[in-house]
Image (cartoon, helix red, strand yellow):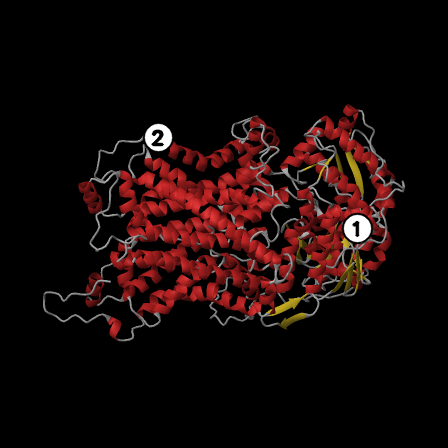
Amino acid sequence: MTTVSPPATGLVVPRQRSQKRDWTGWKFVGPFMLIFALVLIAPVIYSIYLSLFKEQLIGGNSFVGLDNYAQALGDARFWESLGRVTLFLVVQVPIMLVLALAAALALDSARLYVSSFFRIAIFLPYAVPAVVATLMWGFIYGTQFGLVGNLNDFLGTAFAPLSNTWVLASVGNIVTWEFVGYNMLLFYAALRVIPVDLYEAAELDGAGALRIIRSIKLPALRPAIVIGTIFSIIGSFQLFNEPNILQSLAPNAITTYFTPNMYAYNLSFSGQQYNYSATIAIIVGLLTAVIAYVVQLTGSRKES
Amino acid sequence: MKSNHSKARRTATVVATGLAMSLALAACSSSGGGGADSGTADDIEAALQEKSTITVWGWAPQLDDLAAGFEKEYPNVTVDVVNAGTGDDQYIKLQNAIKAGSGGPDVAQIEYYAMPQFGLSDALVDLSDFGFADYEDDFTASTWNSVSLDGGIYALPQDSGPMAMFYNQTVFDSLGIAVPTTWDEYIAAANTIHAANPDAYITNDTGDAGFTTSMIWQAGGQPYSTDGTDVSIDLQDEGSKKFADMWGQLTQNDLVAPISSWSDEWYKGLADGTIATLNIGAWMPGNLESGVPAAAGNWRVAPLPTYADGTAASSENGGSADAVLKGSDNKLVAAGFVQWMNQGAGAQISIDGGGFPSTTADLESDEFLGYESEYFGGQKINEVFAQSIDDVVPGWSYLPFQVYANSIFNDSVGGSYESKGDLNTGLEAWEKASADYGNDQGFSVTAE
Amino acid sequence: MTSTISGDPVAAPVAPAAKPYKAPRYARKGAQPGTAKKKSTWLTVIMGIGVIYSLLPLFWLFVSSTKTQGELLNSFGLWFSGPFAFFDNIAATLTYDDGVFVRWFLNTLLYVVVGAGGATFLATLGGYGLAKFNFPGKKAVFAVVIGAVAIPGTALAVPTFLMFSQMGLTNTPWAIILPSLISPFGLYLIWTYALDAVPTEVLEAARMDGAGEFRTFFTISLKLLAPGLVTVLLFTVVATWNNYFLPLIMLSEPTWYPLTVGLKQWNAQASTAGGDPIYNLVITGSLLTIIPIIVAFLFLQRFWQSGLAAGSVKA
């Protein structure tokens, strides 16, 4: 933040108000924080409270301390769903980010015809709601009458995107389709603010295009890549919309505990097991926060 | 009970304390219990003369006509029909509203398999308090059995779904096979159909809890029994095994189409003959007529195939009843609507709208039995259905948490379908998961 | 990457300036010196494949919306077939079930205008406050808000639902609007943007003139913050238009559904026992749902592109 320099008239301008306790800032931040407290802080606290109790259809509500947590840690379904989103994370996120990176670099290279068309077209899927995206891909994935079915007839293959083996990849495809454009734009914005001087210096050194990418663009992209990775990680752990909507088309491949969020959702709304659901959500939340923090530390340590 | 959306907006300035906040709210209608809890027919009639509004949650297509008919007869009453989702989707919202104590309807459509869950959870009004126990003889035995729980009457049956085998005559004619009357013949026909055309199947199945329980019912199984909070589950009893062993011959040998019922591919299969039969409830004709018009004239109805001993047996598949919620502010009016809709003049409106009746008078009428269906090539389909009602195996009951149990069916039995493995293994897994849930919820569940 | 419970996209486009800091000259397209930038055909072709991937489902959606329910199941997905039923489908979509689709459209507009508008306003106010004022508890505010981003949506969904149902807010538009008013991403963006875009000298000058803080904000700072504000507005508009999960659990009756939840209900109903096969309406409805947002995007792309780039400059 820039400091105030004394004006030429010689008048002494009051120093920054950091010296005395000034609450003016709260007038601006207040409204945000008030609603924030209601819709974010309160539910979190209530969630923690819920996780310490247990309400049964027969027997009512009772305090159970950390029993729910113990139960979760021993729950095979919970670990299976956690394992699944971790697998998803490890495969889908790098693929999506690499594609987004490649696209951003291609756009930035100024070697494309009609690059603004590409930019918009690839970004467009981001504007499509998850519901519509999943419905579309769900129809396309149909093996009897969908596009995949047509392809199978044409090529003589028997590819079944909604079978047990392929369903996770199919979900990954939908998520990639939705967000690759967004990440591409994230990277592209970062590339665009690289100072021109750096390129001039590189030219003087006689560096080729690939060298420029390696030495100038990638380092400049690092913070954007870190942020993109962190939020993709968070999104992967939170995976819910797409498998939930796809479930009716693949009820045997997508279980009610396919992802931790689905498990928590079904525990709450099908099973009325709110307390256990809150516990699962808190554990996953903590895990996500820890991993995101670690990634952020690793990312910024490399930078310095 | 009115929903709150029409109320004035309220600003929610609540500081986070983190605990359950129950603010007293002006004009919030969650008093739960406003309105008489019991009454005579005269009380109901008197209430219907006064100005009131009730909300009805349901998805049956005849509801709009029923509401209109009722409003015509009782002009002071407004009936608000809301489609809050089909089946499970609505039950979730119903449970949420019951738990929250507000936001629910006055009347709700509840399928028979979900009746124990809602009836025993103290959320529905015992209609015998309004004298509805007198209507027992007006309804079929199995539907009445489904709404009378623990000595009380918790809903009035709306329609029923005695099972039958619907089959596409043209498929059997073109292959020269006789229509199966036993399950062994059914399996043989399945082989013939699939061998002739690898895209064609005798039926479709990707694992459906409602279908499976109905079929176990037909096979004579009684896997569920409830006594207060003691529950026992045995999905490997004689009837369950009989069904699983028989049906497994189809699922393990790729003889059922891997298409989910009610999907667009399913409708296509019914139209072009690649799905040759459906073992389903008697309410299906209406759906075939509207959803598969291209196959008009091709389909017929026959009784379900029998097992080796040859005894005719049937079960119920689907069908719903209508209940009054305890949280309703207008119980008299709501009860009046339920009675009119299902036992009074509304029953005929439902039938006209394509519903399959649950009222004995209608089921036994000559007009009903003599009906020749154009879609089914002039066949007197109701005769088959009426016979099916007589053959329904008595003594069946569902779990007090059947809605949940059905929601996790595919998690366990689905595995058997995917891997083309033994259905019995899947049933055992389902039994265990259901028992675990029941015990977790405070029931004492024994899994045999 | 899925959105948080408030429907807010969780990402902040940031790029530090190169070290040592000096006012960067933005790279203009083609301004990178070097060998003459000749257009590469094969690169264009490869990108073209990417575009086909992105647009294929949308093309399928459009083609399918021109088909009747019967034709949908009968024909090859990527080309027209049968009678051209586009306008019939639109009419049917708008009138089915007493025109509930139109109601859902109006609901969505309400949620977007109030929700996204409110979110942008709150984020701008808050970000500005964080950037330009020092106040007690500032560090805590910052930490808490950034921490909130890591919380999974479901950890909040059920307790928010239970809380709101105790307060009588479920099944009302407030249940949707209130959570969508919080955009941590927007707050962060305005905060980083305001640090540079609103020079403190200008504020000091206004203070010396005796102007109140809010007056200064509305008359001076807001104009300076415009590109960042428009960016936040655009992203919150997309998020609220596409909001699905929270409305799904908060609303029990179709009266207040947004389009996303309504479409899901139509699709579910078409796939349940005894339902109406209305896949053609689901498809046409989906098309009608995404058209406004795509149009908004294309129309306002100038703003968000400059906003993203400008907003990513940080001190």
Q: Position of residue A148 (x, y in %)?
A: 56, 33
Which amino acid, mark 1? Gly
Q: Quadrant of residue A110?
A: top left
Q: Looking at the rendered structure, which numbered label has been put on residue B344? A: 1
Q: Quadrant of residue B338?
A: bottom right
Is residue A199 something that shows in the picture?
yes
Q: Position of residue A29 (x, y in %)?
A: 36, 65
Depth order, front residue of B83/A180: A180
Query: Within 10 Å of the Cα at label 2, are there few (<14), some (14-19), or many (20+) other Cα atoms?
Result: few
Is residue B358 something that shows in the picture?
no
Marks 2/1: CA distance? 75 Å
Depth order, front residue of A272/C269: A272
SS of the residue under disc 2 = helix
Which amino acid, mark 2? Trp
Q: Is residue C188 left or right of residue B54?
A: left
Mark 2 sits on what residue? Answer: C42
Quadrant showing the C terminus of chain C: bottom left
